[in-house]
Amino acid sequence: MEVFLSSYGAAIVQMALAGVLALSLYLPLMAGQLSLASPGFYAVGGYTAALLSTTVFTGYANGSYPIPLIVVEMVIAGGVSALFALIIGIPSLRLRGIYLALATIAFIEILRVFALNQPWLGGAVGIYNIPQPFFSATRIEYLLLALPLLFGAMFFVARLERSRVGRAFIALREDELAASAMGVRPTYYKVLAFTLGAVLAGMAGALNAHILNTWNARQGTFDLSILILAYVLVGGSRTFLGPVIGGAFLVALPEIILREIAGAPGLNPVIATFLRDGRLILFGVLIAVSVFFFPYGLITPELFKRRRKKPEKVTVEAAKPTPNVRGGNL
Amino acid sequence: MSKVSLSKRLIVFAIAALLAVAPSALLAQAQEVEPIVIGVAVAQTSNVALLGQEQVIGAQIAEEFFNARGGVNGRPIRLAFADTGGDEAGAINAFQTLINRENVVGILGPTLSQQAFAADPIADQAGVPVIAPSNTARGIPQIGRFIFRVSAPVAIVAPNAVKQALKQNPDIKRVAVFYAQNDAFSVSETGTFQQTVKDLELELLDVQTFQTTDTDFTTQITNVLPLDPQLVIISGLAADGGNLVKQLRELGYEGAIVGGNGLNTANIFPVCQELCDGILIAQAYSYQYDSEVNNAFREAYKAKQEKEPPQFSGQAFAGIQVFVEALTNLDNRKPLKDLDLATLRAELREEIMKGKFDTPLGPISFEETKKDDGSPAGGELVQEQFYVAQIQMDPGGATGRFVFVD
């Protein structure tokens, strides 16, 4: 167990963060907006924490950086991301579907090139020697911060889904025209969903800057957009549990294939080499297969409904076909 | 007692005897051949894999070479490979696997400097020596006491090409500099080049910028040519750098050209073809370097890959060599079998720092560095020899090669 935790500590923490990032994409998707901007806010959050911890909150020896300061950084990073989201969201959320996706890709590209060219952000090498709160080589202690963030985000989204605002999001997703006819302000709720997602991504970035010990322009690029989208698609985009489980699953999978299955003793060396070098092929095939067989993702709301409904007895009256009062098809 | 029970007893006795003898026999055998495990964490997949694969080949050749020579005083070495992929999280996972599951004595890796900033602190906290085969950024050995590198930083390698240009034409006075603004490596490299120009008391006529995605450089060239430069220094990547050279020559520039590390690849041959001829590029490794170990390495590489070994393979070989020779020195001082893993790792760090190693890169050693706060850090490379290669194109411009000059 100890060897397991010390070997996979960082990977387990990354699984939790993947869940947070997936939720950050799930939120705009709840309001029907396909935004790929999460990695952009994730990068903003990471840079915010990296700058704060290396230039403002200095003077702590390695391993003794106070945890409350990291929480402060996460809050500030969330705020900065929200600000960015408002500035970008208000004009770009007038775009729809594929155009919004393109605009958000442009946003992360602009951020990446900007960061690459700014000496105060460290250029390509980035900002490094980010102070550590734990004096340990395993990184598993970061679960103390990552799990509350994940569970907090899950709780928030779960409550949101049942609130007035959440129902407005879902109404927009199902039919924007009908929703606005019912008095739901489309731009307001879209920007709200976008901003809430940005806050989550920014906080995840802030935490990950400490976990990785370094932050640079290679974090939060278009590759990550696609990965996060895969978390949501594979996990399921109709309930908040889907993205969380999809994220954890897809982060763990390549590691399991690489370190456990390919490294198993007595495995044919040809197969082992294929598993090692071709694991990304395998990864892609699994995503394709899962989307093909589970088009709504692995976790769907029906899974829970069916289980809940089972004990209920179907009364004879309810089972009777109701007469069509409207008389004919509408 | 019946007969049956006697035979049963005999069988039980026989089995017990076998059980008692077999493991000890196996154990003795295992102890005799149990190799010393050295970790290799480089990018075997992702877009960095082109470099990582070269490093894997270099490390594998080193493993065969040193095991054929008796390993560490008769005990063989075994390389444990862990793929880092191209990102920081992958590097951390690979390091943790090597340290905690493979129980390596030291790690060669990772491929990128950015990955080193993420993964090296983990090895440093665990007290595991790391030798970086290709991290050239500033601040790598300063990450921690256990961090070393065999890859010379740009600031030390690059100026040699300018000095070579002056050697070929001592009349050079007027210099123009071009660099790719959107490539951070080029930005930091051009800083080094411009400093070198100042240090050598040359006249810096003009500094022009471009983007790595540009294909048309006529504006920048037209700005510079009227100033009549005698030397042009370019920091960029292969495609843009090659095109810039091509257009410089087409527009009539006849002076010397020095290229940065981004142009240090045969991939520029198809871009500037015949016009690539004569570009000078500084190198940290030369396959033509004449020493016993480099000749052996070059032979082994050519036998496997049917081409001359590149810098990345040479540096990876050198990294493994430093581990093997430091382990041998340590074994001579304190037998390795008497040391527990933590002590072995700590002692190995001291041995690497003290040692002098005759590698394919030439003679190298390490000097102590300090962190910003003055606390002790890792070992920066001290490399005695650097090399400069000049591109030589065949007539027609279809093929060419890097020829080392001195």
Image (tube, coloured by chain):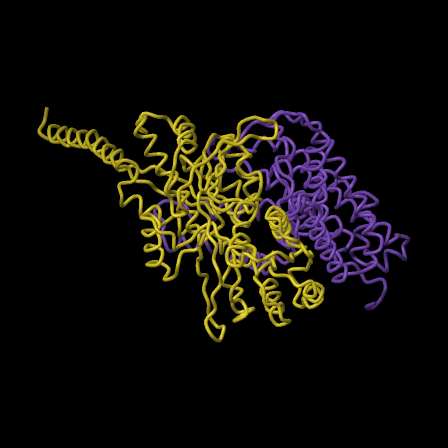
Chain colours: A purple, B yellow
Residue A103: quarter of image: bottom right
For this orientation, the residue located farthest to the front is B171
Numbered disc total = 0
Q: Position of residue A119 (x, y in %)?
A: 69, 45
Give the image quarter of residue A140.
top right
The quadrant in which the C terminus of chain B is found is bottom left
| Position of residue A131 in the picture relative to residue B63 (left or right) | right
Q: Nearer the viewer, residue B91 or B268?
A: B268
Q: Residue at x 54, y 64 (%)?
A: B268
Find residue A27 and report its horizontal and vertical position in percent.
74, 48
> Is residue B238 in sight in this rendering?
yes
In the foreground, B382 or B183 = B382
Tell me if residue A235 can be seen: no
Q: At x 84% / y 44%, what residue is drawn?
A: A164
| Residue B376 % position (x, y) | 53, 27
Q: Is residue A155 left or right of residue B86?
A: right
- Report the side of B176 relative to A257 (left or right): right
Looking at this view, name the residue that lies furthest to the bottom.
B396
Give x and y (percent) for residue B196.
Answer: 60, 48
Of the 4 image quadrants, the one containing the N terminus of chain B is top left
